[in-house]
Amino acid sequence: MPRFALDRMLIKLGTYLRILGYDSIWDPVLRIHDLIRVADTEGRVLLTCNKHLGSQFPTPKQWLLVPSTTPLDQLRYVIASMRLDTHSGLFSRCVKCNAPNQRIHDKRTVRGVVPEPVWLRFKTFTRCPVCGSVYWFGTHVRNTSATLGLILRSEDSTAGGASAELGGCGESEQAHKEKHS
Ligand SMILES: [Zn+2]
């Protein structure tokens, strides 16, 4: 499973790749030389729309020149070019932190953390070990997946059998209450 480092022009694309479960990093303040070094050191594929790699800048060990189109078209380009699996890792990674989400085995632990109707409806929840965000297969997943042009398998019987969906909620119970009060 390839891992990615993205230049600062491709942050939206990086977010999409995280949604698909791909380890993807970027740093808006990192200079291209440093980004190339990080990518090479960590064995990441550098995604860039900088056409000067190889001339004005060093050539990374692994890289892909991404066209300057919309983020969605860029995603389609990367998926096709690298033959990415768009199903296996879907929503397995925190979109904010890039950390792999962990399955919550006892859903009672997130009661009061997620909205009550969500808690009642869904059986499967995951949590980011870094920021504590709780994810569930809810309507957001279907919407996001439709946006990305993905067809989903059902991961939760309550999702209706046609689509798996994911929702996300704030970093902590406190943040959640502030958001919803
Ligand atoms: Zn997180």
Image (tube, helix red, strand yellow):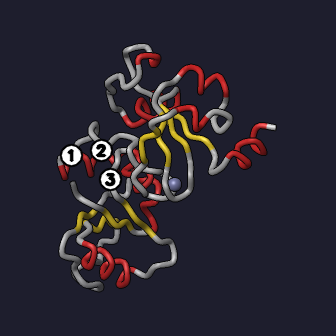
Mark 3, residues whose alpha carbon is within 10 Å: few (<14), some, or many (≥20)? many
Please say if 26 is above or below 143: below
Does residue 25 appear left or right of residue 128 in this picture? left
Q: Residue furthest top?
A: 160
Residue beneath the point at 51% across and 24% down: 122
Asked which secondary structure carries label 3, the reply is: loop
Is the distance from the Cβ of mark 1 to the nearest ligand 1 atom less than 8 Å? no
Q: Which residue is mark 2?
A: 76
Does residue 144 appear left or right of residue 17 in this picture? right
Given this view, does label 2 or label 3 mark the residue nearer the observer?
A: 3
Given this view, does label 3 or label 1 mark the residue nearer the observer?
A: 3
Q: Quadrant of the N terminus?
A: bottom left
Distance CA(mark 3)–CA(mark 1): 15 Å
Mark 1, residues whose alpha carbon is within 10 Å: few (<14), some, or many (≥20)? few
The amino acid type of the residue labelled 3 equals: Tyr
Between 74 and 39, the residue placed more toward the observer is 39
Whichever of labels 3 and 1 marks the residue nearer the N terminus, that label is: 3
Instruction: Say which quarter of the image contains residue 20.
Output: top left
Q: Which residue is mark 1?
A: 80
Q: Position of residue 127 (x, y in %)?
A: 50, 45
Residue beneath the point at 42% across and 41% down: 103
Please say if 117 is above or below 129: above
Distance CA(mark 1)–CA(mark 2): 6 Å
Between 146 and 120, the residue placed more toward the observer is 120
Is the distance from the Cβ of mark 2 to the nearest ligand 1 atom less than 8 Å? no
Q: Which mark is residue 22?
A: 3
Instruction: Say which quarter of the image contains residue 92.
Output: top left
Distance CA(mark 2)–CA(mark 3): 14 Å
